[in-house]
Amino acid sequence: QVQLVESGGGLVQAGGSLRLSCSVSGNLQRIRAVGWHRQAPGKQRDLVASTYGGTSTYTEAVKGRFTISRTSDKFTWFLQMNSLKPEDTGVYYCSAQSRLSGLFDVWGQGTQVTVSS
């Protein structure tokens, strides 16, 4: 089994930065990729960034501003968020994609990010 715990959210002014962390425990061999999802108020949860095999992809809305990284042991993953905008506000979740199903089927509890204008 895999467990994920996010931290690092908070309130920041537009233009500021935050770094989210995702601590991973359990069987890392089960994980194909790690993703970061955002759920804005009243909206569905969307994938904003993911990384697989050393390659990271980002949705257009965050490209150039957000960066995924990890520790060498792969037990902690980060989402560095720069030049934050009010529309980046939401609950951010890290997730693990299963090697077996291809689904992002393990989720952390989420961390709130609020960007004030």
Image: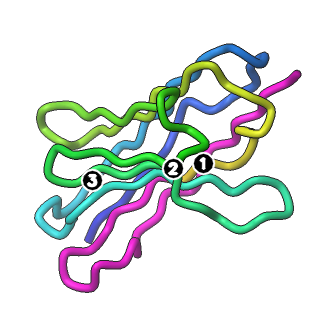
On residue 92, the disc is: 1
* Residue at far front of view: 60
Tag 2's secondary structure? loop
Residue that label 2 marks: 59
Tag 1's secondary structure? strand
Residue at x-position 22% and y-position 54%: 52
Q: Give the range drawn in magenta.
A: 94-117
Where 19 falls versus 90 (above or below)? above
Q: In which quarter of the image is the C terminus?
A: top right
On residue 108, the disc is: none
Q: Quadrant of the N terminus?
A: bottom left
How many C-alpha atoms fall within 10 Å of the one at disc 2: few (<14), some, or many (≥20)? few
Rendering coords of residue 85 (x, y %): 74, 28
Q: In this view, does 85 lie to the left or right of 117?
A: left
Where 82 falls versus 57 (above or below)? above
Amino acid beneath label 2? Thr
On residue 25, the disc is: 3
User: Is tag 1's residue or tag 3's residue first in the polypeptide sequence?
Assistant: 3
Rendering coords of residue 54 (x, y %): 16, 44
How many C-alpha atoms fall within 10 Å of the one at disc 3: few (<14), some, or many (≥20)? some
Residue at x-position 49% and y-position 36%: 63
Q: How far apart are marks 1 and 2 (CA)?
A: 14 Å
Q: Which of 117 and 75 is in front in this view?
A: 117
User: Is tag 1's residue or tag 2's residue first in the polypeptide sequence?
Assistant: 2
Residue depth check, mark 1 versus mark 2: number of the one nearer the observer: 2
Tag 3's secondary structure? strand
Rendering coords of residue 45 (x, y %): 64, 64
Query: Magenta stretch: residue 107 in it?
Result: yes
Q: Nearer the viewer, residue 38 or 26?
A: 38
